[in-house]
Image (cartoon, rainbow, N blue to C red):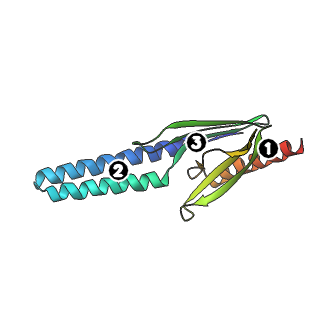
Amino acid sequence: MKIENSIAANFIRNLYLGIYFFIVGATASFAIIYKSLTLFYIGLALFVLTCIIISLLSYQFLIVVVEPERIFIRYKGLNPLFSENSSIEILATNFAGYKIQPAVFGLRKNLHLFVNTHGGVAEYPTINLNLLEQTQVEKVEKALTLLQTTTSAK
C-alpha cells in the first residue's frame, strides 16, 4: 500500500511562498512609499509572526509505503525557510507498534512509530499526518495495525 500527499503538499508550499513574498513586498513598498520606518518594523514583526505560525503547523510532504516485509516513510517539511528531507525504513520483524495522537489543541495528527532494538523499544521522530485525507489516514492506520498483528503473531 502506498499513500502520498503531493498535490496538497505542493499547494501548501506555494501558498507559504506566496504569503512570504506578499508580506515582504507589501512591507517594502509601504515603507518606501510613505518613508516610514514604523511600517517597516510592523511588516518585519508580521513576517516573524507568520514564520512562527507556519513552523508550528509543521505540514509535511509524505509518502507512506506499508508492505508485509517493511514500512517505508519519506517526509519533508513544507516550510520554505526551514525544512529537511527525512526517511524511515523499519523491517516488519523489528516493528514494535505505532500511535496516532492529536497535538497542538487537536489541530495536528501525529504518527509515532516504535521499533525493537537491542536496548529495548525506540521511537522514531514524529510524523505529521495533517495533509492526508481522513480516508488515507484510516488506510495507514489499518495497514500498520495489520502489520503489527502479523509480526506479533510470529
Q: Quadrant of the N terminus?
A: top right
Report the residue at 19% width, 54% height from top. Answer: 40
Report, in whole angstroms, how far the alpha carbon at label 1 lies from the one at label 3. 20 Å
The label nearer to you, 2 versus 1, is: 1
Residue behind mark 3: 62
Residue behind mark 2: 19
Residue behind mark 1: 147
Q: Amino acid at mark 1?
A: Leu
- Residue 2 x %, y %: 68, 38
Disc assigned to residue 121: none
Label 1 with label 3: CB-CB less than 8 Å: no
Q: Is residue 51 left or right of residue 65?
A: left
Given residues 95 and 24, the one toward you in this image is 95
Neighbor class of circle 3 (other Cα within 10 Å; few <14, some 14-19, many 20+) is many
Which residue ends up furthest to the front in the rendered image? 119
Label 3 secondary element: strand
Report, in whole angstroms, how far the alpha carbon at label 2 lies from the one at label 3. 22 Å
Quarter of the view holding residue 93: top right
Neighbor class of circle 2 (other Cα within 10 Å; few <14, some 14-19, many 20+) is some
Q: Is residue 103 left or right of residue 89?
A: left
Report the residue at 35% width, 47% height from top. Answer: 18
Report the residue at 10% width, 54% height from top. Answer: 35
Label 2 secondary element: helix
Which residue ends up furthest to the bottom in the rendered image? 105
Q: Amino acid at mark 3?
A: Leu
